[in-house]
Amino acid sequence: MVSLLKDLDLAGWLILFTKRCLGSKCPCRLSSESYSIIRQELKAEVDKIKEEYPNFKPGLAIVQVGDAADSNKYISHKIKAASEIGMEAKHYKLPSSSTLAQVVNQIETLNKDHRVHGIIVQMPPDSDEPMDQDILLNKVDASKDVDGLTDHNAGKLSRGELNTCFIPCTPKGCLELVKRCGAEVSGKRAAVLGRSKIVGAPMSDLLRSQNATVTMCHSRTKDLPAVLQESDIIVVGIRQPLMVKKEWIKPGSVVIDCGINFIEDKTKKSGQRMVGDVDYVGCKETASWITPVPGGVGPMTVAMLMSNTIEGAKRNLHKMKKGGAWNMRYLPLQLETPVPSDIDISRAQEPKNVAELAEELQLLPDEIDFYGKKKAKVSLSILDRLSGAPDGKYVVVAGMTPTPLGEGKSTTTIGLTQALGPTYERMCLPVSANPPRVNFKGGAAGRLLSSHSYGRVIDTNDRYLRQITIGQSPTEKGITRTTQFDITVASEIMAILALTTDLKDMRERLGKIVVASNKNGEPVTSDDLGVGGALAVLMRDAIKPNLMQNLEGSPVFVHAGPFANIAHGNSSILADKIALKLVGENGFVVTEAGFGADIGMEKFFNIKCRYSGLKPNAVVLVATIRAIKMHGGGPKVVAGKPLPVEYSEENLELVEKGFCNLRKQIENASFFGVPAVVAVNQFATDSDKEVELIQKLSREAGAFDAVGCTLWAEGGLGAIKLAEAVQKACEQPSNFQFLYDVKSPIEDKIKTIAKKIYGAADIKLSEEAQKKVDLYRKQGFNDLPICMAKTHLSLSDDPTVKGAPTGFVLPIRDVRASVGAGFLYPLVGTLRYDTADVLFVIRADDWLCSPILGSEGVCMGQCTSNLSETVIGSGKKCSVRLYKVSIVTCVFN
């Protein structure tokens, strides 16, 4: 039966009950005026949202089974109402032959769609086979149940938790009508006639939450007229036409009629007339306010459906808006002295399940792919969902020129986020670099990587594979040739992964990889060989950032790991972008740049930020007293000998001499217009005067601030002052700028980096390097940024030269192109990739060595490495436990 309520559109309803309101005191004006006002209010609310988020629209999904005419009409009213106020409503109509499972699948698909903020299932389903309506209703995600009919929302309402649930539309509309007529609810007597879960039961809960004294009446209620005569507010929904009489109601009461019934009326074309459960003609003389049928509660129900959908959209936006806090469960740290080994620390803490971490980050179910219980990959669709959200503060951690004694950039990165997060109560997400495990074998990809100008990569650093002969199989038809393996982090594909901005961009970059040049000197790309698509398929999962956690249960993105000399040495752009959206405007994303600031930071700014379009807010430059002393001319650290006393005793003169290197790195940061905060990684052997001297010299050199940290031992508690300084630095105006114009000649770009960042007087290109520069210019690659491949142990090309040398000429022996990644990389001097003269910091109880205790309890045991860099020792496991020292330092020669 097609009801008149569903035959009339919203405008028709308004006209109908406006015509019936002949006097200003006519009670039916309540619905007419209220609905019109509410509709305008909702439209204004949607307009306000769009002002802040132009591409955002509250979305309503209506699921219908079958093709019932009355349902179609009712759904069209809802879609029209949504359109009138600027919402987007979509109708999902399934055939009557649909099974329960098919309808559930449709609902679950909509549950995962971030563009949908409200879902309603049109009842009853017009299906060939009966369907359990409770199952369908409860399959709707509670956060999208704008009908308010799931058990979850009903339970919340019954407990009075109105701010965290959706209220069913009809009861919510009824209460809105009561309030808008000016009637007091708190302390009044209210009667609800009917106990359905759609109207009666939730209406009773809702009135009770407003402090009314509520009596729920039903077919078994004795002396019903007496109950109603004592009630100030009466809500009726009992499906009995004209049941409530004039004599039953209290003079001056407010009467809300939710009934929809049909009685015979031969004067009507249809032969019937719609009436409510209340005798409207008689009761309107007694009630102060009363709703008519039709035209009373119906329009308000639709209005409240729109209101709930907008509320759902606002809750969704709240996750993106500035200051929206994560409900993060941080894991407490049990600090010990001396600091235990890494393995002991990690085993003492039970990490959270990554599913809990994803929920705390407010990720949607379709945005997370679990890899076991402790790690997961996150979808790039997060960027679409949060496209209108403001970014957080962007902080890069770099350091002074590395020394064998170490500086602690990674430790500072994690410690700073621990201070900003659980300790300082700011949303913070560190982003670290780590290579994906991707193997290429067989097919077109294998043939591509066999090309004479493009080598293979492997995750294991086995030096025997650095130059090999291949093609000895009979199937190779005598094509024997020399090739090589590089470590994975040295591959161009790794650099592409780190610099790509979306899946399409990665596909284009992979297609641009130059594998050779033809006889005319023209580049031959992977797309020319028809394998660019195959490479993209192999990388389709690797492009998703990895979600992990630190010791305190804070989220960490670990993604990509390009080498910092022949590549740019930074984590992925995608991980950074997703993190910046997740933390919100008041949050922080802290990422680390490889090696010293002259390498990793320079490439972070000139390459990574150029492609990402992101503007960093601050730089943290990490330094240690020992490293500064070495740059000041401190004694060489020799394997097998005790650590010289200069590194463990106060020596202000040596500190002041070595500060020249840190001063140069502070200057390097200033070239990009980004404030720099110096973090002095402070250890037990450092004197207060030495730390204070570094702080004083850093500020004089132009650093925004300089603070001492003990985060290596105390976690976030040891970095509170650093967190305060970083926050203040991020509040400064951003004057970020690039060091050079990419359209400048290749030689000029190389010279700019050499002179400004390294302190060189000039550059000298070898004959081979100049040929390559001319070739790349001819091939159209002049406008690519520059990625200098040089030693990380010195600002010059000589790794033995410490401090801040000037006046030298930087030799460029070759220039190569990573066209897919998007940069040219000049090879500086005689860059070595071995471990000679490099200290590796390892755990005493994790490796084999022959410990010899030097000063301050540092093990200077003689350790060696074979060609694959595997540690070989005496065969006796070191069991040394050092007071206040949790690591041993071993020298590889």
Image (cartoon, rainbow, N blue to C red):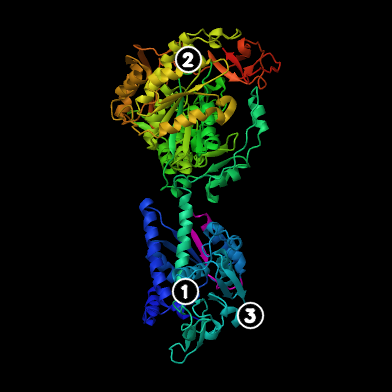
Which quadrant of the figure contains the C terminus? top right
Assess whether residue 222 is covered by the magenta stretch. Answer: no
Q: Position of residue 621 (x, y in %)?
A: 45, 24
Q: Residue furthest left?
A: 744
Seen from the viewer's position, the closer of residues 416 and 183 is: 183
* SS for dot 3: loop
Q: Position of residue 386 (x, y in %)?
A: 44, 47
Whether tag 1 and tag 3 are in contact, CB under 8 A, the answer is no
Is the residue 27 above or below the residue 204 in the image? below
* SS for dot 2: helix
The total number of labels drawn is: 3
Is the residue 373 above or below the residue 778 in the image? below
- Residue topped by disc 3: 219
Within-10-Å neighbours for mark 3: few <14, some 14–19, many 20+: few
Is the residue 856 above or below the residue 112 in the image? above
Whole-Å distance between the Cαs marked 1 and 3? 24 Å
Within-10-Å neighbours for mark 2: few <14, some 14–19, many 20+: many
Residue type highlighted by circle 1: Gly
Which numbered mark, 2 or 3, is in the foreground of this view?
Answer: 3
Q: Which mark is residue 628?
A: 2
Residue interval drawn in magenta: 108-130
- Residue topped by disc 1: 298
Q: Residue furthest bottom?
A: 266
Residue type highlighted by circle 2: Ile
